[in-house]
Structures are given as C-alpha cells and as structure tokens.
Amino acid sequence: MGIGWNFPSNNFSQLTGISEAGIETFRGAPYSSLAREICQNSLDAILEGSKPVTVEFQKIYVNKLDIPGYEQLKDALQRCLDCWKIFNNEKAVGFLQNSCKVIDQDELCVLRISDFNTEGLTGSDKEFDITPWQSLLKASGVSDKSGAAGGSYGIGKSAPFVCSDIRTLFYSTYDINGLTAVQGVSRLVSFKDENDKVTQGIGYYGNIERNTPISVSLSLDKNFNRSKRTGTDIYILGFMEDDKWKEQMIVSILEGFLVSINDNKLIVKIDDVTISKGSLSTIINDYKNGFKYAYNYYQVLTSEESIVVNKDFENLGEIELRVLFSPDLHRKALITRSTGMKIFDKQNISGTIQFAAVLNLKSQEVNQFFRQMESPQHDAWEPNRHPDTKNAKKKRLAIFKFIKDTIHDLGQNKNTDEMDAEGVGEFLPDDISVIGRNGEKEVEETVTDKTKNIDIKVIDKVLVSQGFAKNNDDFAQEEVAATGEVIEDEDSEAIGRFPTGKSNILKGGLENIVSTKENDDSENIIKKYTEVGTTYIRMFLIDKSAKLYKLIFLPEKSATNGYVKISLSGEQSNTESDVKSAYLASNTKLLKCKKGKIYLDRILENEKTSLFFILSHSDNYSMEVGLYGNQI
C-alpha cells in the first residue's frame, strides 16, 4: 500500500470551486475563528475534569523538503492554477497564484496547534464509523458530539483551513486507546490529474489506496515532542502571517473563554504568551483596550461585590447568574456553556441600571437543550433550529426574563451616588433645582437605578415582529434609553408598539371640542381647543424621589397655542393632576404649567416631542395624557 497524496476523482460529478461554504463562513475573522473553534474542540475532549486543558499555538518555520509529499502537493497546486486559468475565474486564479509562490519558498511558515489533557482523536482505525477522527478529517456536515459538547454542525473543522495560504493541514494524534495516527488534508479546487481525470478538489496524505492514516507520529516542530501524552497536533502549512495575528488570537481567547480560564479549565499558550488563571489579571490589563466586553466580565468574575444567584431552571438543572453593579459597567450579560465558552452577549436588559453579568448554564441537561438552538457559529440561540421550536422559544424567553428580573430586583437595592441613565443625561439640566418654583425647596439631582413604565390609557396597543426598532429607530432607541426594556414575546426579542395613525386619546376623535371662555391666565385669547391625536406616546418615571417623568409623543396634527393635559385615572372619573414644573428635552426653558396642563407654543404634525415634568404627588398613579390646541 503506497503512501503519498491522493486527490480522488469526482467521477463526473460536481466541480469544487474556491468559495467552499465552510471556509467562507470563517473568512471574515480567520484568527479569532481559529482560536474559538480549536479551544472549543479541546474542551469538549477533556480527559481529566480536575485538571485544565492546555492548548498551544506555536508559529514555526519548516524546510519545504521536510513536508511529507511536498513535490506531489506542489504539483497539485500548479495543476489547480492551470485549470482555473482556463475557466478564467479571477478569484480562484488570484488565490492559487499566491499558493504556488508560498509552497515554492525554501521555508514555509507553519502554525503548530497542540492540546493536552484531552482524549485525542479516537477512531483513527475505523474506516466507516462516525468517530472523532472521521468527523474531523473526512466527514461533511457530520458531528459526533452530543450532550453539552460544543460543535453540532461539523463546520468548525474549516476554520484552520482559512488560515492556510495553501489550504493544507496535517493531523497527528495519540489517543486514550494508545493509537497513533497521522494524515494530511488539502482542501483545494477540482483539477485534472496526470491521467486527465477531474478530481474532487480535496486530497489526503496517507495510505493512498483507501485514504487512511499512517500509524506513526509526526512532528514538524523540532523543538516539540508529544511522547506519550494524549492529545492532538494540527499543523497549518503556509500559515498566513500577519503582524496582528497573535494579538487577535489573545483577544479572541479572552473574549470567548474568559470563564473557562478563570475557572482553571483552560490554559492557552500563544507563542511566548501564556494565558492562565494565574496570569489572567496581568493579561486582561495589558490588552483591555482591545476588548469589546471581556474587561467588564472579568470584574464580575473577580469582584467580592458580585452577587451570585443559582436557580433550578425549568426542570433542566442548575443555572448560575453572577451580577456586579458599578457605574462604569456596560449593561450586558455574558451567556456561557458549562465549559465556560461564550455563546453571546445578552443586551436590552436595562438602560439605567449600571451592571455587568455572567450567566453559566451549569447542568448537562440545560446545556444540551440550549445547544440544539445554537447557530452554526455557536454565537446565538435560534429556536427554529431546535427540534421542539415552540418549547425552545418559551425556554429562551424564560431564561431572558430570569436575567432581566433578577438584575432589576437586585438593582433596586443598590444605592449608587451617581448614575448616568443612557440617553437621559444629555437632556437633564446640570442643576435640576432650576425646575422648582421660587420659594420652594430645591429638588436634589438624583437618578434612580430603577425605571418604571407609567400606565397610560391608549386605544391601540399593537405588537409587531422584529424589525420595528429599525423602522422606528428613533423611538425604539429613546424607549430603550429611558427604560432599558423592550417588550418580549415568544417570537421576538425586540418588539415595540407600532404607530397606527389613530388617536391614543380615549375621549373622542380629532374634532372633539373642549370649550373655554378664557385661558388659564384669564386672558380672552383662546376661545376653544381641539383635541390633537398622537400616533405614538410613551411615558417613563425617571426619578421616583424627584417625581420626575419623561413624556414622548408624536402629534397627529399641527396646532398652535396647545397644551398637554396630564390626568390621574380613577375608577369612576379622572382627577386633575398637579404638574409642578416642566421643560422640553431640547432645552431647559421652563414651560407654563397650570391645573395639570403643560402649555406649548406650537405642535407640529409628526414631529417628535420630548418633555420632562415634575408632579407634586408622591404616589404612583395610572395617568391619561391628552393633547390639545388650535389646529392650523
């Protein structure tokens, strides 16, 4: 049985081009994807749970003649180039021209990836079973993983090929059964071989007759010897050198596996940098400017002020939420598997409570359930991927609700001296006491860490599907800024109220006339007011202690010399509110207020108006809002 490279014939079936789907999936972030996929696979294959898995990424240079089957591989690349020049495929020709240059160099840049305290790639001696070896090297769309294991689509194997200028890897393993195996895989394009047969585009180095591995060990790194330590080595030939490759991988590891490293489940060595529980503090600070969120989450994991809440979730087992409240945190929650690998960041939890949180799916059962709704990139929960879609939607909504409710409940009890409510601070005056009337006690400037929606009587409450925030972006952002919340249901994470064009005032339509002999200053200027409808209206309690509210509305018609009327809703009838003071969000000029009315100089159709007002009442009431004016 001969040993060498073999590119099987396609037997007159499909051609393989340069834009292979699995590889294209990871092209946008090659180094980050490589780090994530490799560490995930290694954690899934852990041997002793009491010890950390160690993964090494070491860049080396290898003499081209030391590469197994070098001449055959070089010939295959040249044949690929010749073939696709005839096809006049610009993308393929550009890639293959560079590949031919790379393989012709005296030394090739190679990235060695090795893991330890793993089982290795078992099943190298099985030709047709679904084993870790077969799934990684020769299967397509197949994964042997189950339970809480990470990969479930079988596309992660493509990530290392993205980082190779010649799309060629060598795999070497020593597994828990004492088996040693080596095989090369080259994922090129279809080409005509020396017998004028069109190949599949994928080739294997090993026993040519059956494309099976060789039962020996391989070390292209002269300074490395696996000996009898179980695990796997991957050699990326023609590794794409980039000045930032190491930095990008370090940041990716810390963003994606911060919890794993902090829990001493994972140690990663990238050239001369070792990322472990012991070195985590130093490395986090060294690279904090490159992180998106990891610096915040590290504070959650290490602070003595973090609050830990454990819950038996929906009879699926334990989940753990760790929360830290601090003015400089980013208001997001990290969702991780039991291995500590990040899935995604949950947002839209609160717009005013300053926090960061980490949710860990701890039990096997809860991991298995949510794994089935993960996207192929393992960075989102998509219920339609789950075998039980309806139940998956409910469970996802329930876990999001648990996160939000817990943070809101805990946040109410956290007293912070200063808190910037995102989107509100820019409208509040430097000294809120300017709102008070002369002679009255000044109101202390504070913004609470809890906001509440005030119940407004409206006609149309319509739930719409995801996409409302895009179509009505200004309103969606302002609502989230004020409350940090959007309505959620089974079908969508981001749902709001859609403007219907109808009046949101209960008492009649646009022509409902409110007669008066005089205005509230006893001046015979305005004889009557016409009710002006709104196509959008929202009210928020901004500061309970200051009795400060924010009102946002979109007038349906234009009017002059109008006013907003705030009424307290009762069971039998409404009661006039006592509006103490008010001002527009666009400036701090005080507006005239009397008998629950806030007077406006003008009301423009479809122009968003935001205003703040203070009530004398200290209790919470349901309120009704009316908009009136002289129609233009």
Image (cartoon, grey):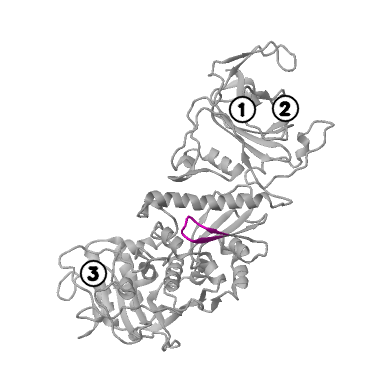
Image point 36% across, 75% down: which residue? 102
Q: Residues within 10 Å of mark 1 (few under 14, many from 20)?
A: many
Q: Which residue is mark 1?
A: 624
Q: CA distance from mark 3 to mark 1?
A: 76 Å
Q: Which residue type does callout 1 highlight?
A: Glu
Indicate left or right for 259 with 386 as reference: right
Q: CA distance from mark 3 to mark 2?
A: 84 Å
Q: Which residue is mark 2?
A: 578
- Disc with the residue nearer the chain's start (3 vs 1): 3
| Residue 472 is one of the magenta-drawn residues | no
- Disc with the residue nearer the chain's start (3 vs 2): 3
In the rendered image, the quadrant that contains the N terminus is: bottom left
Q: Which residue type does callout 3 highlight?
A: Asp
Chain part drawn in magenta:
310-320
The reply to whether the C-beta atoms of the residues labelled 3 and 2 are less than 8 Å apart is no
Above or below, 93 relative to 579: below
| Residue at the far front in the pictured view | 315
* Residue 454 picture location, percent across and down: 62, 35
Element class at badge 1: strand
Q: Residues within 10 Å of mark 3 (few under 14, many from 20)?
A: some
Q: Which residue type does callout 2 highlight?
A: Asp
